[in-house]
Image: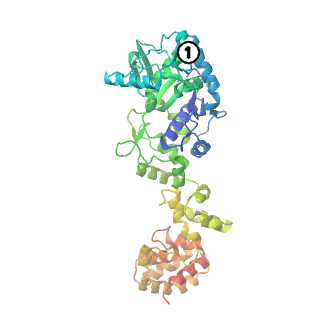
Amino acid sequence: MAEDIVTRFAPSPTGFLHIGGGRTALFNWLFARRHGGKMLLRIEDTDRERSTAAAINAIIDGLTWLGLTWDGEIVFQFSRAARHRQVAEQLLASGHAYRCYCSPEELAAMREKARAEGRTRLYDGRCRDHDPKDAPAGVNPVIRLKAPLTGETIVEDQVQGRVVWQNENLDDFVLLRSDGTPTYMLAVVVDDHDMGITHIIRGDDHLNNGARQTQIYQALGWKVPVMAHIPLIHGPDGSKLSKRHGALGIDAYRAMGYLPAAMRNYLVRLGWAHGDQEIFTTEEMIAAFDLPQIGRSPARFDFTKLESLNGHYIRSSDDADLIAAIEQLLPHIAGGQELASKMTPVLRAKLLAAMPGLKERAKTLVELFDASRFLWTSRPLDINDQAKALLTDEAKTLIAALLPELEAVPDWNATSAEAVVRPYAERAGLKLGAVAQPLRAALTGRTTSPPIFDVLAVLGRDESLARLRDQAAP
């Protein structure tokens, strides 16, 4: 592309960074990175009652966790209100806008009449050619765009294709309110122009805004950015995404134990395709991403797919990196404080030794944390119901018979433990599983764990024997 690409992510800080916002930010980031351009961040905080510092922090934290970096300083829309007013006055001066003195009651009557007549243009334009000398006293006017009454407004959308609006159906919308504050429509155009935005990538709920904003650009004689309106994310059943489907904040996915790389990979495939490829490194995403490959149909959120993908990333992650990720998660999960208080170099070494076995089954970091609990939990173990069912009197007698042989093992490791347990099972006429399962229940309090000989090795001689004595028949 000849020009330098500049995209932007422009959230309103009225709540958390939701999953759709995360995907929009990712698409903007990927497109900019692919073309060697920039992605800017603008906080659209003009709704002063609903915009909060906590929401701004949540957006920044969410983007940072996802690994999406922006270029330059954050732009806060509210701070640019004087510039927005200046442009509204510029449109007035050029005859592309006018002052409207209609009362709320008049506007309500106009809307009612238009709807009764089946018209989409709700404002009847009565102030379009109003002589300023006839302005009513004591009324603060709004400023409206003098939109074209005939012809078409066209958006050549990179996702939706060519979208055409008949100008006779579009309103003279408000640019500046009666209190002098700019509307969203004006502020967005002015900010995008001043920030040098070349490509606007956002949800298709903004498609109609694309027509209105195009009219403002044209009235100002400014170049209209390329637009790409991406379909929204729906639930698995095809309905609008709700909390039960996964319409949560990015921070919630972090707390549930998803990895940033897995979230990026999952989000990029929500509506964008590159052949049959499902797994992408960040570098592969950047190299492959383009706007025409985004589908026009809403993407469907699927927790099962996300879990499966996250499991893949956990299995392929470096063991030390997984321990660091779990440690970052500890303040946000039940029981995390207990592990944090016990984390010593010795325990960290145990976790590192156990990680290859632990990560094979885990789909989230929370599952990985739970699976590691046997390494750091205190005696006597909290044994769950399924494990208790395995610790029958017969199983406890078996453990008691095996204990002296294990106590005699000179060099404690997985191989030496197996060299005792396997022959014992053969002498007793039992399959290895019939011995391993009671041992697993006694050593971990659970029915699933890494391979039993690895469990014995990582717990060490003293802790393993102590736990087995706790459950052995007297």
Q: Residue at x 58, y 33 (%)?
A: 46
| Residue that appears at 47% across and 13% down | 128
Q: How is the image coloured?
A: rainbow
Judged left or right of residue 312, residue 346 is right
**Left or right of residue 353: residue 422:** left
- Amino acid type, label 1: Leu
Residue linked to disc 1: 220
Q: From what the image shows, is residue 367 above or below residue 251?
A: below
Disc 1 crowd, CA 10 A, few/some/many (<14, 14-19, 20+)? some
Q: Considering depth in this image, is 106 or 402 the residue closer to the camera?
A: 106
**Total residue callouts:** 1
Q: Position of residue 68 (x, y in %)?
A: 58, 40
> At x 53% / y 83%, what residue is drawn?
470
Residue 234, percent from left and from top: 39, 41
- Coordinates of residue 401 in the picture (x, y in percent): 49, 87
At numbered mark 1, what does the secondary structure look like: helix, strand or loop? helix
Q: Quadrant of residue 465?
A: bottom right
- Image quadrant holding the N terminus, namely top right
User: Viewer-proximal residue, 435 or 193?
Assistant: 193
The reply to whether residue 359 is in sight is no
Considering depth in this image, is 337 or 177 the residue closer to the camera?
Answer: 177
Q: Residue furthest left?
A: 117
Using the image, determine if residue 345 lies above or below residue 176: below
Q: Nearer the viewer, residue 437 or 238?
A: 238
Q: Is residue 466 visible?
A: yes
